Amino acid sequence: MHTVFTLPDLRTARLPFSGTVGLVPTMGYLHEGHLSLIRRARDECEHVVVSIFINPTQFGPSEDLSKYPRDLDRDLKLIEPLGTDLVWVPTAESMYPQGYQTWVEVEEMTNPLEGAMRPGHFKGVTTVVAKLFNAVQPHNAYFGQKDAQQVAVIRQMTRDLNFPIEIVVCPIVREPDGLAMSSRNVYLDSAQRKAATVLFRSLNAAKEVYDKGERDAGMLRQITTEVLASEPLAQVQYVSCADYDTLEELDVVKGRALLSMAVFLGKTRLIDNLVLG
Ligand code: AMP
């Protein structure tokens, strides 16, 4: 496994790859969710490139950029046994040198949900992913369903900018008690960690009534919200039941829908979701 830090070194290392290349973009502090993406890329591609970059432009001014967990040695040890060819760890200065002024922005789809709560977030995400795509030139790129809106936005960008790249979406990997794995889970103290299971429980409560035939999106949002409200440590930021493709809020669930949420436990903001239909 080769680890490179600069763009010229990445290009040199990428050059001899003759078969299909799979890219797994991450911000590091890897867990089983990330590793599942790498394994999937390994299964489907001849070469696997993992990028580790805490992209400053997708963090708002009051967000957790400076304290975002990082441990490159640990990450490399986790990646090594999975058969990754190349790990790219760009520096912020090389991605956004002095005078940087070019941005990639997806419009409507970034307005609701995470986009509404985190202004500018998706502009940072699409810009960095476009730069990673340009640099690595992968055939496939692997993303987690955990960040459902991110997947939708990146699909749209890939289509709109004609990137010849297959976007592969991998299922959410959860802890045994249902909490979706996240690098941010390390921020939770033990009481908050216990309380955090309420996200998955609330999704399941809505899924149960959906499976019994409930299609009123307002009702599904209400059931989810009620379960979340039963946990005193949880502060709901939003609960959404939206069209899976357009992310527009629904009145009635007809096709595929995305039930999603953002919830604070103390200062830690967690997101989770479930696809209905
Ligand atoms: P991050 O390092 O948080 O930017 O995540 C890198 C990639 O891993 C993104 O495509 C995420 O959606 C994906 N990911 C993060 N957590 C999980 C999880 N629990 N299950 C599956 N994929 C995940």
Image (cartoon, helix red, strand yellow):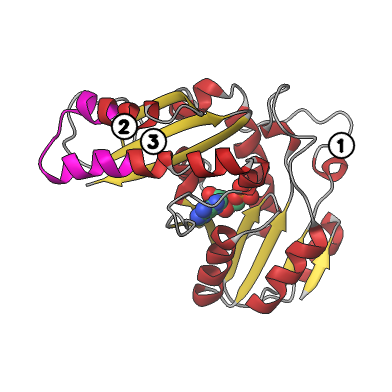
**Residue 164 visible to an observer of this rendering:** no
Q: Residue type at mark 2?
A: Thr
Q: Is residue 64 positioned above or below 178 on the image? A: above
- Image quadrant assignment for residue 189: top right
Task: Locate residue 105, reporting x and y percent.
Answer: 58, 30
Q: Earlier in the sequence, mark 2 or mark 3?
A: 2
Residue identifier under label 2? 224
Q: Is residue 244 positioned above or below 175 on the image? A: above
Q: Would residue 174 be found to the left or right of residue 46 on screen?
A: left
Q: Residue type at mark 1?
A: Pro
Task: Locate residue 75, reporting x and y percent.
Answer: 74, 62
User: Foreground mark, 2 or 1?
Assistant: 2
Mark 2 neighbour density, 10 Å: few (under 14) some (14–19) many (20 or more): many
Circles 3 and 1: CB distance less than 8 Å? no
Q: Residue visible at 83% across and 42% down? A: 92
Task: Locate residue 227, reporting x and y percent.
Answer: 33, 32
Q: Secondary structure at mark 3?
A: strand
